[in-house]
Amino acid sequence: MSPKAIEIERKFRLREAPAADVLAARGAVARRIEQVYLAGSPDAERIRRTETAEGMSYRRTRKRQVGAFAFEEDEEPIDGAAWVEGLGRADPARRTIRKTRHVVTHGEQELEIDVFDEPRGLVVVEVELRHEDEPVVLPAWLGEWVEVTGDARYFNAALARLDAEVPPWEPGQA
């Protein structure tokens, strides 16, 4: 695995996904993502397949929380054969996360808008930060949102659990 990096991010739940024409007008780049958690891994080890207009890529990642919204991430590229091998080690208590990620530049930050296949209708925006005090100002075109940074129910590892339930949308929920 590559050297560990610290990822600092804030996370927001949207009431609904922005319309395709709104995303296109902002130059959104779409990526189809499949993410599988591996059995017996203490640090939420996962493999991910990402499909873009340029083709497929694969990564193995170990991630663990080290701060309020900071995570230590150990990540490396893998090939298609390692992806297939990893599928044989999938955690049976977790489903595959499938989502479309729309990446949009917003000022000096990137918005990663994840539209989940399951739980259906869940839309989450992640904003990676350079430091924990960096301000985040979401654009109005995202519509209604609530911050869910630090809410473990919105971690992908939790969403993958077969018994995971996402709370119904309520304005002002935390």
Image (cartoon, helix red, strand yellow):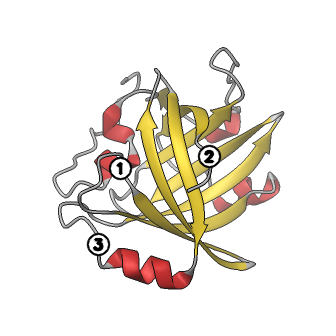
Mark 1 lies on a secondary structure that is: loop
SS category of the residue bearing label 3: loop
Quadrant for residue 87, please give it.
Answer: bottom left
Rendered-image quadrant of the N terminus = bottom right
Disc sitting over residue 89 in the figure: 3
**Residue under the point 73% across and 77% down:** 53
Whether tag 1 and tag 3 are in contact, CB under 8 A, the answer is: no
Task: Look at 71% across and 33% down and name the residue there.
Answer: 139
What kind of residue is marked 1?
Ala
Q: Mark 1 to mark 2: distance in Å?
A: 17 Å
Disc 2: CA contacts within 10 A as few (<14), some (14-19) or many (>=20): few
Residue 79 vertical placement versus 24 (above, below): below
- Amino acid type of the residue that numbered disc 3 sits on in the rendered structure: Arg
Q: Locate residue 167 relative to residue 142 in the image: left or right.
A: left
Q: Decide which of tag 1 and tag 3 comes sooner along the chain.
A: 1
Residue 9 vs residue 73, the one in the foreground: 73
Q: Residues within 10 Å of mark 1 (few under 14, many from 20)?
A: some
Left or right: residue 119 compared with residue 2: left
Spatial CA distance of label 1 from label 3 is 13 Å
Vertical comparison of 29 with 167: above or below: below
Q: Looking at the picture, how far across and down is residue 18, in whole percent?
A: 61, 50
Q: How far apart, in angstroms, are the residues tagged by discs 3 and 2?
A: 24 Å
Q: Residues within 10 Å of mark 3 (few under 14, many from 20)?
A: few
- Report the mark closest to the observer, 1 or 2: 2
Q: Where residue 14 sits in the image (x, y, percent)?
A: 50, 40
| 1 or 2: tag closer to the N-terminus | 2
Residue designated by label 2: 3
What amino acid type should be assigned to the residue bearing mark 2?
A: Pro
